[in-house]
Image: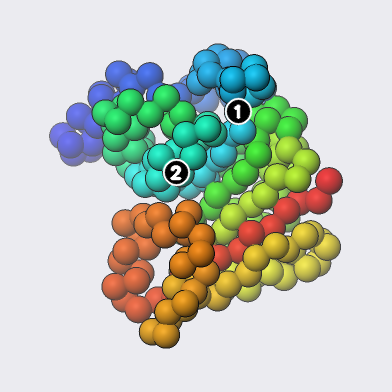
Amino acid sequence: MGKDKLRKFAENLTFDNLVQPDFDDIFRRDHPLKGRWADDFFGRRDPAGAERPIVLELGCGRGEYTVGLGAAHPDRNHIGIDIKGARMWRGAKTATEMGMANVGFLRTRIEFIESFFGAGEVSEIWITFPDPQLKKGREKKRLTSPVFLANYARFLAPGGVIHLKTDSRELHDYTLRVIAAAGLPLFVASADIYGGKAGGGLAETDSLLTIKTAYERRFLDEGKPITYLRFGLGG
């Protein structure tokens, strides 16, 4: 392991906005923050005393989208989730330096996400440029597979939405098929949010879609269209 990774792992331990549970804390058991993120982690409610909406970014990488969403919506609490601690260091450090009390990070595998969030605790989920898992037999590993959607349904609030932003047309089309097969509500579907060379795409009217990760910048430089879906899980 390189010295830079070791340095980042060590600094991660100093960040109050980064939760890194041990495996034994979550395997077949609930984490102490489950159902209590608003009070025990963020410690902030709205002026009326109600819990602020929680927004997750799954597979957050360096946390660019989580930080961007937090800056755009300071009235909401945002949590980036990933297993790569060296990558998450960047987002946790940026949020710390900017004093963003509404941004946090959770280092864990998405497969264990039910251990962290209670029924109705999450209002929105963003899935940004995940591994599309295109190899044969890997469909169940896709973050929009029926298996994962069933997990999200256990903690997504009624009326909550899921956003998928990806350069993978295969994952985009696969998710459309999953949505149709399950009869889920589809609110927005775009095969190119920037509208190609002609412009005029969805991103012109939805500023949240203009937040860019390092991956997205690379894909745009390669001329790949960026796709987007917004859908619900019913209920």
Asked whether residue 9 is in view, the answer is no
Which residue lies at the image location 26% right of the left edge and 28% below the top edge? Answer: 97
Q: Amino acid at mark 2?
A: Ala
141 in relation to 224, above or below: above
Q: Quadrant of the N terminus?
A: top left
- The residue at which mark 1 appears reads as 52
Q: Position of residue 151 (x, y in %)?
A: 71, 42
Toward the left, the furthest residue is 3
Q: Amino acid at mark 1?
A: Arg
Locate residue 179: give its quadrant: bottom right
Q: Position of residue 11 (x, y in %)?
A: 25, 24
Which residue lies at the image location 35% right of the left edge and 60% below the top edge? Answer: 215
* Left-right relation of 82 to 8: right
Q: Which mark is residue 90?
A: none
Toward the bottom, the furthest residue is 198
Which residue lies at the image location 55% right of the left edge and 49% below the top edge? Answer: 126
39 in relation to 101, above or below: above
Which residue lies at the image location 65% right of the left edge and 65% below the top edge? Answer: 188
78 in relation to 192, above or below: above
Q: Position of residue 69 (x, y in %)?
A: 46, 44
Mark 1 vs mark 2, CA separation in Å: 15 Å
Q: Position of residue 203 (x, y in %)?
A: 47, 66
* Left-right relation of 72 to 118: left
Q: Nearer the viewer, residue 168 or 140?
A: 168
- The residue at which mark 2 appears reads as 72
Which numbered disc, 1 or 2, marks the residue that appears first in the sequence? Answer: 1
- Counting the numbered discs, the total is 2
Locate residue 113: give its quadrant: top right
Please, what secondary structure does the residue beneath circle 2 have? helix
Please, what secondary structure does the residue beneath circle 1 have? loop
Asked whether residue 64 is in view, the answer is yes
Near mark 2 (Cα within 10 A), the count class, few <14, some 14-19 or many ≥20, is: few
